[in-house]
Amino acid sequence: MRHFRQGTFSRKDMPGLIRPFSPSESLNNLEDVDLAALYATGKRLVLLDVDNTLLPWKSEEIPDSTKRWIEGGKAAGLRFTVLSNTHNPARLERLCKAMGIEFIRDRAKPSRRMFLLAMQKEGVEPAQAVMVGDQLMTDVWGANRCGIDAIWVKPIHPKEFIGTTVVSRKIEWLLGHFLYRYFQGDGADEESRPGFFGRQIVRQILKFGVVGGVALVVDTGIFYYLMFVATVGDRSLKEVAGTWALKNLPWEHGGHDLQEAAYVPLKVVPVLVAILVSYILNRIWTFQATHEKATISQAVKFYVIALIGAFIATVVGSLVQRVVPLSERPAWAVAQMAGIIAGFIWNFNGQRLWTFRHK
């Protein structure tokens, strides 16, 4: 995590839009968290992430430094609870038993449920708890949703779950540029970097977004033409396709609506053409990959990434809609935006690191 810096954040001065993702401070190492000072300020419960906070991802070896840190906290009067939604509960139980601390396994962060269960179990108020974790989008956001102070620590090891690398870390990178405007640090970890728009990756992201807009226009234009303009003899293409779909496709359409029935078969061509346009523009303009010959293999990679991106957008949108505590329409809008962002991040990184990767 090249952009990581150690210091505190002035959360009270932040816009409300980014404040939910801001920690109270960021520290380079778990051992930099001063547990005695936390106790002195009224903290009694330390909530913890596991992977890349206490130990490397998927590891069973607990670092000696982590063990000493926890023992020091216990000596200071603090209690510890791990929050995890792991699919390997046996590993979680082994690790927590070895460290002599409690754990809560429940819904994925940033859901409030695990935080609330831990506080209820230990009999503390939000002001008496603190969350220590390596991810803004789960550990910090979840803690802030419950009114708990959050300390953001640098990941122990660069290896982590691919979803974290491709989605969460990229969102953190973008959020960091806004959060660090309200940052107070010693500058020891700050790098000499070009301006925000001077970075190649930022320019690529902006270009990728523009190309996505062009592809959307192409998709919509072709789809509109096929649905409302194109004809086959003296019949509209929509009528022909809708009639065929009602007879041959395995799902039912309420009221035998030809427009509803024609939607899927007539949507296929616009999507494929839009992806092709996106491939060409991203190859020439966004990633400037013209130094390599265009191949069928490269085009197939592009289509694979794009189709997986559509799936990810759908899944993320569905999950977010379950988590956000809003009424139906606002929850749908937030879920749609989350899905679009997740799909965009996947598509950009997949095309950049796989399809158009510079050898």
Image: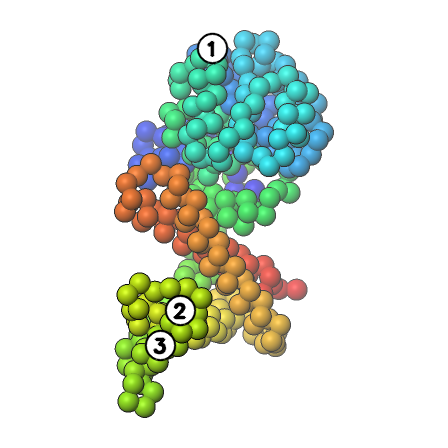
| Residue 26: image location, x then y, percent | 49, 30
Q: Nearer the viewer, mark 3 or mark 1?
A: 3
Cα separation, mark 2 vs mark 3, equals: 12 Å
Q: In the image, what residue type sits under mark 2?
A: Val
Residue 17 locus on image (x, y percent): 32, 40
Give the percent coordinates (x, y) of residue 5. 51, 35
Q: Earlier in the sequence, mark 2 or mark 1?
A: 1
Query: From the viewer's perspective, is the residue at label 2 or at label 3 nearer?
Result: 3
Judge the density around disc 2: few (<14), some (14-19), many (≥20) Cα neighbours within 10 Å.
some
Residue 162 in the image, given as x and y percentages of width and height: 59, 48
Q: Is residue 157 visible?
A: yes
Q: Nearer the viewer, mark 2 or mark 1?
A: 2
Q: Residue at x 60, y 23 (%)?
A: 31
Residue under circle 3? 243
In primary-sequence order, the first of circles 3 and 1 is: 1
Residue 182 visible? The answer is no
Q: Quadrant of residue 41?
A: top left
Residue 264 numbered mark, or none: 2
For the N terminus, the image quarter is top right
Front residue of 317/23: it is 317
* Amino acid, disc 1: Ala
